[in-house]
Amino acid sequence: HVISNMAASSGIANGPYVPMYTFKPYYTLDAVSLPEGMYKVKNYQEVSHQGSSLSISPIDSLEQRQEDVLKKLERLQESVSKLAERYSVSGSPTDIPTPTLSATTSSTTSSQITVRNTQTQPSQSSLLGRRNGVLDLVICADPASIPLSLIVLCENLSNQHKVLKSTFVHSSVSAESVSDKFRSLLTSNNGIKRDNCDLAINLIWRKVPNGPQLVVDPTKQTTIEGEANIARYLTRLLNPSHEEDDIVTATLIDEILDLAQLQLLDGKTKEKTAAVRTLNSMLGKSDWLIGSEPSVADVVCWSALHQTNQASSSPANVKKWLNLCSQHKLFKSVSGLLS
């Protein structure tokens, strides 16, 4: 149009105007169909059952998983049973002693923590949680911090059962750090043989970072750590029916054992001081922590005070109680270790 106008204005007439060329449109305005999703997958909750597709609820799926886990456990139990039969391992996990705790003694002159005669006494084999064979206890302790309560309880086990006692020194401690009296702390001088024993206690002096350790059966149990926890286990061997006799007393003893382990042995300075004050308040009402006779609570707390060097600076009631402990037959087996 511009060229024709220019031609008209200039007086040049070359005929009608015709476009030089045309273009086809390079896009169309047709509607584009967009997909509803990026891609499609099968529903993971749908399973094929006899040629049909069924939807499983989350609860049904959980039940199916539980059944699969139980089947795996059954297969694992069968494998363990075959290994036990192959290597002639006696006993079963149900043979482990029932968790109970001792708290009383038979008389003021007795040096044993015994059980009240309110029920028929079980046999020695049932007391030790085994039908046949010897129950082996391996106690690892650091000679720098002697667990006095465990020595007391082991000696009491020797008074009630046929016990084979042995002491060893691990290479993690130097020979100079273990004196002769520590090397012979637990020994069987009466010539007892293993075949005639109910129980074998092995004390190993070695470096242990978190207090003494007890191993009973590494194939069935984990390591028991802490003096109070090991004392609980040993008193279950001494007195397996105490919780049935007096659950309230057993609960009080458990609280004191926690106080001894968590505050006196493992606590900071303020926590240790608070624990000593608690003991002093309890001993202001009676000569012993629980009842009229020394219990495992007295033994462990007495050991904790001596290990943490708090016995000499204790308040009046605690000092009076420490004097009673030193005169009692229950503590005579370790009196020479305090000097």
Image: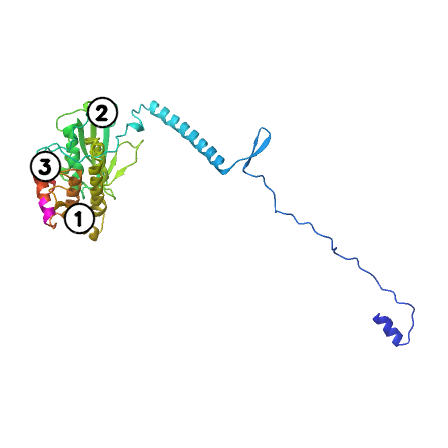
Q: Nearer the viewer, mark 1 or mark 3?
A: 1
Is residue 318 a member of the stretch shown in magenta? yes
**Amino acid type of the residue tagged 3 in the rendering:** Lys
Q: Quadrant of the C terminus?
A: top left
Q: Which residue is mark 3?
A: 332
- Quarter assignment of residue 162: top left
Is 14 left or right of 27, judged from the image as shown? Answer: right
- Quarter assignment of residue 49: top right
Is 53 left or right of 331, judged from the image as shown? Answer: right
**Amino acid type of the residue tagged 2 in the rendering:** Ser
Location of residue 57 in the rendering, given as x and y in whole percent from the top left corner: 51, 37
In depth, the one of 67 and 226 nearer the eye is 67
Alpha-carbon neighbours of circle 3 within 10 Å: few (<14), some, or many (≥20)? Answer: some
In depth, the one of 301 and 249 nearer the eye is 249
Q: Which residue is mark 1?
A: 278
Disc 1 to disc 3: CB gap under 8 Å: no
Visible residue check, residue 195: yes
For residue 202, which numbered disc appears in the image?
Answer: none
Q: Which residue is mark 2?
A: 125
> What distance separates the C-alpha of mark 2 from that of mark 1?
39 Å
Choose the circle earlier in sequence order: 3 or 2: 2
Alpha-carbon neighbours of circle 2 within 10 Å: few (<14), some, or many (≥20)? Answer: some
Choose the circle earlier in sequence order: 1 or 3: 1
Is 288 left or right of 56, judged from the image as shown? Answer: left
Count of numbered badges drawn on the protein: 3
Location of residue 193 in the rendering, given as x and y in whole percent from the top left corner: 18, 24
Residue range corresponding to the magenta coloring = 316-320
